[in-house]
Image (tube, helix red, strand yellow):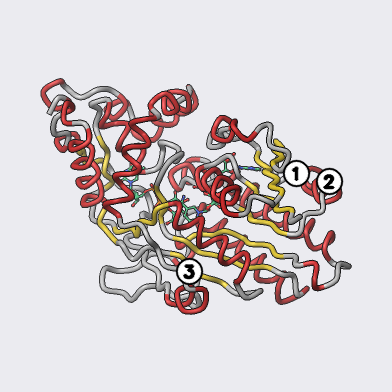
């Protein structure tokens, strides 16, 4: 039986990935190592609690004894490493934890796996997938060609710099030790279970409550939006069939400005909840994010040509599924919006965004 360690499995992509692998590889034993920070939610996978092929371990990847003892206790042969601090705005407010988790945590996992696997025969099939981001390539201008896997790294934020450092550690383990690592760099994900600090679920929450939907700067920044289930399928392809030591870009080729994206999201919300009326007037321009990257775009030819992976879900379809999920899970949203979350919003956006707009705007 394949034993797969998933780190960060109680977060957004992790929850979707655990569910996806459970469905398509039902015989695998899945071990989910997650610290349950503000972004991790055990409730997401509560229905797997009695499953003998699912083990949840609450622990910190930056803590060496936790990580090394896990490899001693289980015959882990595959790793999908998702655990990270992930929100760019939080990395600007408090960068230290990003270095600890994203750099030291990744080092611990690489080193524990290297020590556990170094004397195993090649046919043991050990593979370590380090999941990273398109942000490591830095900001593109509107007309620049998309980044390929060999584009230079130029991270801008403490978040992307910490992910870049982790990527280079992973690359060094392949070059130095022949360690069986694979790296993926993916564009912006959206879909069910995303914590409502990220643009799409946050804008949706604000709109549902008739509060301002804040857009940084003039809303011209461009992101490429991938439905999370497409990302999960790509990760499994790379884990199983990717070439060791290689990097694979994963993207949707669905670039939109933030303003275009939020307008589309609010239009879909209005179609699904006509009783709310038109909420476009909630869009509010707020001061820009420091060091805000203008545009990310990925060339995804490599994964298409070598592994046959392509995104399946269009942006419109993915947004409809996402809005439907959040509308059906408003109790989930309520429970994750804790005191810590509300304090973060106040620090990040100030009172004006946290409070309801005047009824004339909110009822729109
Ligand atoms: P998330 O913030 O939703 O979840 C992160 C998870 O990691 C949480 O469950 C949290 O509890 C856990 N975690 C944090 N610190 C930990 C620690 N020290 N030890 C153990 N667990 C810890 O993140 P996400 O959006 O699901 O992203 C997952 C991964 O994918 C990250 O590595 C991120 O860099 C990468 N990624 C995300 C996106 C995106 O758009 N969300 C795009 C490309 C790459
Ligand atoms: O590109 C992949 C990355 O995408 C991941 O590696 C990160 O973990 C993930 O957080 C995401 O980073 P972004 O900074 O692109 O995502 P975020 O949802 O925070 O913001 C998307 C865009 O929207 C960005 O240009 C900033 C802008 N924005 C965001 C928020 C939260 C706003 O205009 N207003 C907001 O309130």
Q: Which mark is residue 63?
A: 1
Task: Calculate the distance from the C-alpha at mark 3 to the C-alpha at mark 2.
Answer: 32 Å
36 displayed left or right of 280: right
Looking at the picture, does residue 12 appear above or below residue 161? Answer: above
Mark 2 lies on residue: 69
Q: Nearer the viewer, residue 178 or 75?
A: 75
Name the residue: 46% across, 39% down. 193
Whichever of labels 3 and 2 marks the residue nearer the N terminus, that label is 2
Q: Secondary structure at mark 1?
A: loop
Name the residue: 54% across, 34% down. 44
Q: Where residue 268 sits: x, y (%)?
A: 22, 42
- Single out the residue that lies furthest toward the right: 119
Q: Secondary structure at mark 3?
A: strand
Q: Nearer the viewer, residue 13 or 307?
A: 307
- Quadrant in the picture for residue 76: bottom right
363 displayed left or right of 188: left
Mark 1 Cβ inside 8 Å of ligand 1: yes
Of circles 2 and 1, which is in front? 2
Mark 1 packing: few (<14 Cα in 10 Å), some, or many (20+)? Answer: some
Task: Calculate the distance from the C-alpha at mark 1 to the C-alpha at mark 3.
Answer: 30 Å
Mark 3 lies on residue: 249
Task: Calculate the distance from the C-alpha at mark 2 to the C-alpha at mark 1.
Answer: 10 Å
Mark 2 packing: few (<14 Cα in 10 Å), some, or many (20+)? Answer: few
Q: Quadrant of the N terminus?
A: bottom right
- Quadrant in the picture for residue 204: top left
Q: Where residue 338 sits: x, y (%)?
A: 48, 24
260 displayed left or right of 18: left
């Amino acid at each position: 039986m394949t034993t797969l360690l998933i780190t960060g499995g109680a977060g957004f992509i992790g929850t979707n990935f655990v569910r996806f692998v459970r469905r398509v590889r039902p015989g695998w034993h899945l071990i989910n190592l997650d610290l349950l920070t503000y972004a991790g939610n055990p409730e997401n996978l509560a229905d797997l609690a009695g499953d003998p092929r699912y083990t949840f371990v609450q622990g910190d990847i930056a803590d060496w004894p936790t990580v090394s003892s896990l490899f001693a206790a289980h015959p882990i042969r595959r790793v999908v490493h998702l655990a990270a601090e992930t929100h760019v705005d939080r990395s600007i407010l408090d960068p230290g934890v990003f270095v600890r988790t994203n750099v030291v945590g990744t080092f611990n996992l690489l080193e524990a796996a290297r020590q556990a696997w170094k004397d195993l025969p090649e046919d043991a099939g050990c593979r370590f997938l380090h999941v990273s981001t398109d942000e490591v390539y830095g900001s593109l201008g509107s007309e620049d060609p998309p980044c390929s896997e060999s584009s230079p790294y130029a991270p801008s934020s403490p978040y992307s710099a910490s992910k870049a450092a982790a990527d280079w550690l992973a690359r060094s383990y392949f070059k130095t030790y022949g360690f069986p690592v694979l790296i993926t760099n993916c564009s912006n994900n959206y879909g069910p279970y995303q914590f409502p600090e990220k643009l799409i679920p946050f804008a949706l929450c604000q709109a549902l409550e008739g509060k301002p939907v804040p857009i940084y700067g003039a809303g011209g920044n461009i992101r490429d939006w991938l439905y999370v289930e497409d990302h999960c399928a790509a990760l499994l392809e790379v884990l199983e069939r990717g070439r060791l030591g290689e990097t694979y870009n994963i993207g949707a080729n669905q670039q939109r400005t933030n303003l275009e994206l939020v307008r589309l999201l609010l239009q879909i919300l209005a179609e699904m909840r006509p009783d709310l009326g038109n909420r476009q007037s909630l869009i509010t321009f707020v001061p820009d994010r420091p060091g805000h990257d203008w545009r990310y775009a990925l060339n995804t030819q490599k994964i298409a040509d070598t592994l046959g992976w392509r995104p399946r879900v269009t942006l419109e379809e993915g947004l409809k599924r996402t809005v439907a999920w959040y509308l059906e899970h408003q109790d989930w949203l309520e429970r994750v919006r804790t005191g810590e979350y509300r304090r973060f919003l106040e620090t990040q956006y100030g009172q004006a965004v946290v409070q309801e707009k005047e009824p004339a705007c909110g009822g729109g």
